[in-house]
Every structure is written in structure tokens, then in C-alpha cells.
């Protein structure tokens, strides 16, 4: 009788662990990406910072990096966050952002947008506007 109860308990534990692991593995991974855009020299282009599978945000910091020889920041527009603060380090090629909310923001979509002017003397080609660490000067784009 003890052997039967042991095996039933063991099977129930295995089933429980399998179900729990499947639930954890099925959770989508949060991600933050920058939209892909295209434009010509002299034009303005808006790049969006987009959140997917948002688990909830109350605070975050990051930098939007750009080639300072080709682009200049014109404007920043908030998305679903309340009041992002930012500082354009135009001489270094990045905009540092800080977001602090009073409640958990669980929306998906546009966190904020950055409007760039493509300089008139910009050479045609592909350029990367990326996401970096808020302490970009110290840590780079890691």
C-alpha cells in the first residue's frame, strides 16, 4: 500500500512540475524595439520606441543612439508613458531618457517617438538608430 501511494505521489509531482514549467515557458518575452523608417537628406523622420509583451513598467532609463554627422534631434513625443524626461547629447550622438511612473504601466505599443532631421549633407545609405544603456558614455550600447 505504501508503494502505491509513493508512486501515485511521484506521478502527481511530475505532472504538477510539467504543468508549471509549461506555463513559465509559454510566457512571452518582453521586448523594446525601434521602428524601421526611411527618408532622404533634408527630410524629417520619426522613429518610435515600441514595447511588446509588457510585464509592467514603473521606471526605466535608456538612450536612443544616432549618427550625429547624419542626424539631429528635432522633437520628442510621449507615447503611453506619462512624462518621460530626456536630454539630447547632440555632441555625443544619443538622447538619454528617464521614465518614472506613479503606477504600473502595462500597455504595449509606442513608449515614445523621436523626430530626427536628416542633415542636408547626409550621404545616402543605411544608418542605425539604436537603443543603448542610459549611461551610454560609460557602458555604450550594452
Image (spheres, grey):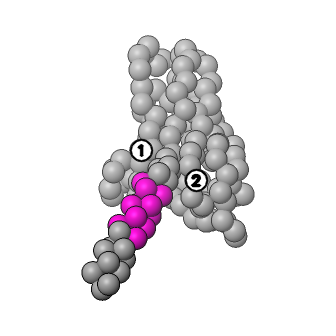
In front of the other: 46 or 6: 6
In front of the other: 40 or 141: 141
User: Is residue 43 at least partly visible in the picture?
Assistant: yes
Q: What span is in magenta? A: 12-25
First-in-chain label (2 vs 1):
2
User: Is residue 63 at least partly visible in the picture?
Assistant: no
The number of numbered badges drawn on the structure is 2
In front of the other: 9 or 16: 9
Residue at image position (64%, 47%) is: 108
Position of 39 compared to 127: left or right?
right
The numbered dot on residue 54 is: 2
Tell me: residue 97, above or below residue 36: below
Residue placed furthest toward the bottom: 2
Indicate the secondary structure of the residue bearing disc 1: loop
Indicate the secondary structure of the residue bearing disc 2: loop
Badges 2 and 1: C-beta atoms under 8 Å apart? no
Residue identifier under label 1: 92
Could you tell me how far apart the alpha carbons at marks 2 and 1 are, in whole angstroms? 30 Å
Tell me: residue 46, above or below residue 77: above
> Magenta stretch containing residue 117, yes or no?
no
Residue at image position (70%, 70%) is: 102
Amino acid at each position: 500500500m505504501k508503494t502505491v501511494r509513493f508512486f501515485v505521489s511521484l506521478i502527481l509531482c511530475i505532472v504538477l512540475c510539467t504543468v508549471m514549467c509549461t506555463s513559465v515557458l509559454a510566457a512571452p518575452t518582453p521586448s523594446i524595439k525601434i521602428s524601421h523608417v526611411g527618408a532622404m537628406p533634408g527630410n524629417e523622420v520619426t522613429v518610435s520606441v515600441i514595447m511588446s509583451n509588457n510585464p509592467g513598467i514603473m521606471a526605466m532609463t535608456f538612450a536612443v543612439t544616432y549618427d550625429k554627422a547624419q542626424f539631429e534631434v528635432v522633437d520628442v513625443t510621449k507615447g503611453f508613458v506619462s512624462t518621460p524626461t530626456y536630454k539630447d547629447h547632440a555632441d555625443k550622438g544619443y538622447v538619454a531618457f528617464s521614465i518614472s511612473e506613479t503606477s504600473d504601466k502595462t500597455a504595449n505599443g509606442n513608449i515614445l517617438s523621436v523626430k530626427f532631421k536628416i542633415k542636408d549633407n547626409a550621404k545616402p545609405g543605411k544608418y542605425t538608430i539604436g537603443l543603448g544603456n542610459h549611461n551610454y558614455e560609460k557602458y555604450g550600447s550594452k
